[in-house]
Amino acid sequence: MKELKDIQTIEDIQLMVNTFYTAVRKDDLLGDIFNNVIQNRWPEHLEKMYRFWQTVLLEEHTYNGSPFVPHAKLPVDKEHFERWLDLFFNTVDTLFEGPKADRAKWQGDRMASMFLYKINYYRDNTSIPLL
């Protein structure tokens, strides 16, 4: 069995992001949602995801923005986030192992929980959210 290395470089981030979103785009539950929202802007979306994970995992501050805002009105619920996490964890575990790989999974889980909570909160409240 091949020993896996940890996430160390921007190339590792790109491999993780590209592999993950290839799986998302093909997924029966998530593919249509992502493809319908992102449409022909996949290169820009992937670039943004590289910068986000580069900032989080490599502590090279290249990402600016509020990650929740583009997700606020997506037609998703708990099952979508569970599938997202399954695909993400599988991607990370297939490609990497180590502290940064563990941090990627922890961060992904944390974001999924927060996004689901906020999406449900704004969906259930009639007030206009301050995103």
Image (cartoon, rainbow, N blue to C red):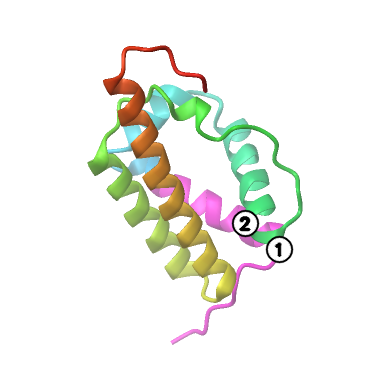
Q: Would you say 51 lies left or right of 122 here?
A: right
Q: Would you say 109 lies left or right of 130 here?
A: left
Residue drawn at 35 percent across, 37 percent down: 117
> Does 82 sit above or below residue 59?
above
Residue drawn at 59 percent across, 43 percent down: 49
113 or 125: nearer the eye? 125
Residue drawn at 52 percent across, 84 percent down: 3
Q: Quarter-wise, where is residue 12 in the image? A: bottom right
Q: Which mark is residue 32?
A: none
Residue 111 pos. (x, y %): 45, 46
Region in magenta: 1-23
Q: Which mark is residue 13?
A: 2
Q: Which mark is residue 9?
A: 1
Could you tell me which secondary element the residue under label 2 belongs to? helix
The three-letter amino acid code for the residue at tag 1 is Thr
Could you tell me which secondary element the residue under label 1 belongs to? loop
